[in-house]
Image (spheres, rainbow, N blue to C red):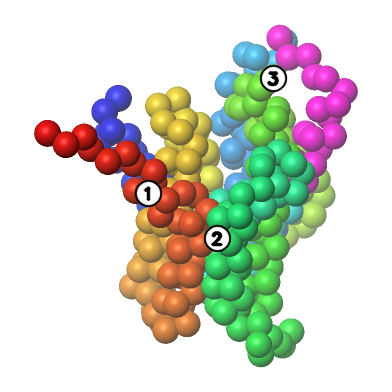
Amino acid sequence: MSPGIINAWIILYAALFGFGFVVMKHLVAFLDVRVIVLFRVLITFVFLVPFAWKKWPNVRIQKSHVVRLVLGAFSGVVLCQSLFVYGLGKTSASHASVIFGLIPILTLFYAKLFRAEKVLLRRVFGFLISLIGIAYLMEVEKFSWGSSTHVGDLIIFINANGVAFYLVVVRPLSRYYSSLWVTACMFFMGLICIIPFSVNPLLIQAWSSLPLSAWLSLLYVTLGATLSTYLLGVWLLRFTSSSHVSQSVYLQTLLAIGAAAWFLGEPLSNRLFISTVLVFLGLAVSQDVLWKSFRRKPKAAL
């Protein structure tokens, strides 16, 4: 596949993620958080079952991997799905997208913490730059538990850490099992934990009063922003590197901020702009974007 076509798919990948923040923000005004989480996990699991079922008879789970599967299910499915929807209901879509832009660098942090990767000074420096940007966005200097936005930002930040932790914990499993099987397995375990808390709000929900926009939003966040992004991400990794795919976070954040301003009327403040620049700068430093030009060998003189 040509680089141009790969980049086009990565743009679509970023767009599905970016618009997901705005659509989800709209949906939480109509549906209980627990119902939304149930639908996202249940529908994703149902679609993954046919892929995972073919490989199930040949899978032999090592005892040492069971803990990783359980931790992955809790952190990546139960905790992250719940905190994301709940936190987004309290803060803005633009704030959430900027905080989520920290996930690649948080992943590097947890990888270093568990000694999965070597510690590089520039990555530590990049992490600190991005962290300063998030702290500025969250207004830590005047944080108040009485502020819905402050609490929502904090929840989304915890959620971003959960996603990064999940990526580090689950990554070694890819050497032994199919990524589709691992995800289906974790979504199944997560579903078992989520169902008991979701049955009651699911039964009392006034489904007949939901507007068409809510139904379309529910369809998008389950099939578009959840299932499609995962399958597309796995498929893209067959043709390019994970670092290349991770660069979509820049476009994803910008699209989310623009869509939130256009469709939700969220303000484009100076604080949001400065925070976004700091997060992007930290990501660029930690992921070698700013260093590649210095590594290039000078062309030989003709």
Marks 1/3: CA–CA distance: 37 Å
Q: Which residue is tagged 2? A: 126
Identify the residue at image location x=68%, y=72%: 154
Tell me the element at label 1.
Answer: helix
Outermost residue to the left: 302
Tell me the number on the disc at residue 294.
Answer: 1
Q: Position of residue 256 (x, y in %)?
A: 42, 63
Marks 1/2: CA–CA distance: 17 Å
Tell me the element at label 2.
Answer: helix
Closer to us: 290 or 47: 290
Q: Which residues are magenta?
A: 58-78
- Residue 53 picture quarter: top right
Closer to us: 115 or 5: 115
Q: Is residue 72 magenta?
A: yes
Q: Which residue is tagged 3? A: 176
Identify the residue at image location x=79%, y=54%: 197
Q: Is residue 230 magenta?
A: no
Of the numbered discs 1 and 3, the one sitting upstream in the chain is 3
